[in-house]
Every structure is written in structure tokens, then in C-alpha cells.
Amino acid sequence: MKKSEADWAEERQEMVRLLAGFYRIHDERILRAMEEIPRHLFVPERFRLIADPYGDHPCPIGCGQTISQPYIVVYMTEKLNPQLGEKVLEIGTGSGYQAAVLAATGAEVYTIETVPELAEHARQVLKENGFDKVQVRCGDGYAGWPEAAPFDVIIGTCAPEAVPLVLVEQLAEGGRMMLPVGTGIQRLVILRRRGGVLTQEDDLPVRFVPMVHTKTV
Ligand code: SAH
């Protein structure tokens, strides 16, 4: 059955109520962004009705990939706490939804996706929804984005076996980086660079798709 924009908006409000109530997310800025950004439009049309885009779980977007569960999107964004005008690098654009949530905080977002079809879809949907300043590159996240570095925030939404050194090198002073690390069992890892010193902390156990190595690298 087809849904109207009003139906989707109601589901979106329900999602935000769950994030604020059950999951105890307090950052109004991010909750408001998630209440406004039409997550369902980031899901390709052929999956939209069956995928339950506002449900409390990851959502399929094609090419064997998913948008993270809303809780994980808001959790990582809250921990990284991007500020107006800060530079953010995302590895693993997927649908573009996480990039949109980051951009809604007023940060300058650069995002890299290895699958051309997904990069193209994300570029399109971001543009159509007013996020045309987000820069989408089809390429290999292991290289980072040297021309735009350093970044105040780096977020990975696919899991390497170990923290890639190249990305650490692209983290600015005062910068925060969060990504899932490991094969099989993964953990979110947070790194911070303060006063030239790098600290690393383990966080939640998670399950993301692997950060793949492309053959050209
Ligand atoms: N953040 C996304 C979800 C990401 S799913 C969203 O909001 O929708 C993880 C994505 O990482 C997949 O699309 C996958 O193709 C991509 N990926 C995997 N390895 C990569 C790499 N080496 N470089 C860039 N992207 C990669």
C-alpha cells in the first residue's frame, strides 16, 4: 500500500520519540535533524515499502548494503558532536543519510563511497533534499581525502580490520574519529587528538559491513 508524506512524517516522529525516550538521546539539534530529514527518500524506491525505513533496525539500500539503525546514526553523531563550520569526513556514504544528518549540524561534509551506483544515488538524493553542499566522492576510503584534510571529525560506517593510519594522519588537532574496527566481532573505537596526543577508547560492540580493499590500492 502506498504511503503519503504525512504517513512517513508520522513514522519519523515515532522514530524520534523512541530515540529520545527509550534510547535517552538528548541532543536536540540532532533529534530535530532526524525529525526533518526524510530518511525514507534515501532508501531507493524499490525497497521503500518493504524495508520499513523508520524501524528500529538497519534498512536495505541495495548492492548488499544498509543504512545504519537510527540509534547508531544518532549515537555516533552525538559522540562526535560536529559543530557549525567544522570539517567532517565520512567513509561509507551508502544512501547518504548519515551524511545528511551530519550536514544538518552545519558541518562541512565530505563523504566517500566505493560502489559507483550508491555514490551516484546518494549524490542525487542529497541534492534533491537541500544538501547540495555535501561532497560525495566515489573512491576508496582507505586513502581518505588528502586535498580536503585535516578533518575535525572522521566517521567510518564500514569496518576495517584495524584503524587506518592514513585516516589518523588526516585528523586535525582537537579532532574526533569514530569507526567500527574488527572482523566478525567489531567494536566502535573513538580516537581523539588533543595537544598533539592521540587517545583511543573502545565503545559499543557493533556489526557493520567490512571496509573493503579495492584492487587498485
Ligand atoms: N553511512 C551509510 C551506510 C553505510 S553502509 C548511510 O547512511 O546510508 C557502508 C558503506 O561503506 C557501503 O555502502 C559500502 O559500499 C561502503 N564501503 C565499504 N568499503 C569502503 C571503502 N573502502 N571506501 C569507501 N566506502 C566503502
Image: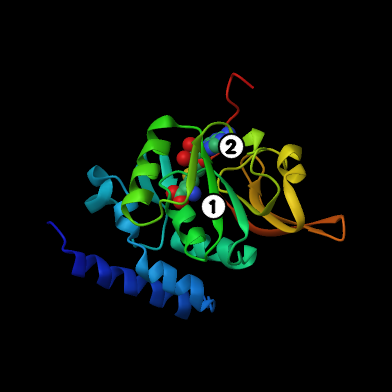
Who's the residue at 61% across and 41% down the image? 184
| Amino acid tagged 2 | Met
Disc with the residue nearer the chain's start (1 vs 2) = 1
Q: Quadrant of residue 97?
A: bottom left
Coordinates of residue 8 in the picture (x, y in percent):
24, 65
Secondary-structure class at tag 1: strand
Residue 64 visible somewhere in the drawing: no
The amino acid beneath tag 1 is: Val
SS at mark 2?
loop
Quadrant that contains the C terminus: top right
In this rendering, position of residue 36 left or right of residue 174: left
Q: CA distance from mark 1 to mark 2?
A: 19 Å
Residue in front for this viewpoint, 62 or 110: 110
Q: Residue at x 87, y 61 (%)?
A: 195
Is residue 20 rendered to the left or right of residue 76? left
- Residue 127, given in percent of the width and then of the height, sits at 36, 49
**From where the camera sits, is residue 217 visible?**
yes
**In the rendered image of this protein, does residue 36 appear above or below residue 99?**
below
Q: Residue at x 44, y 62 (%)?
A: 70
Q: What kind of colouring is applied to the model shown? A: rainbow
Distance from mark 2 CB to nearest ligand 1 atom below 8 Å: yes
* Residue denoted by label 1: 109
Mark sitting on residue 211: 2
| Residue 87 point in image, percent of width and height | 62, 55
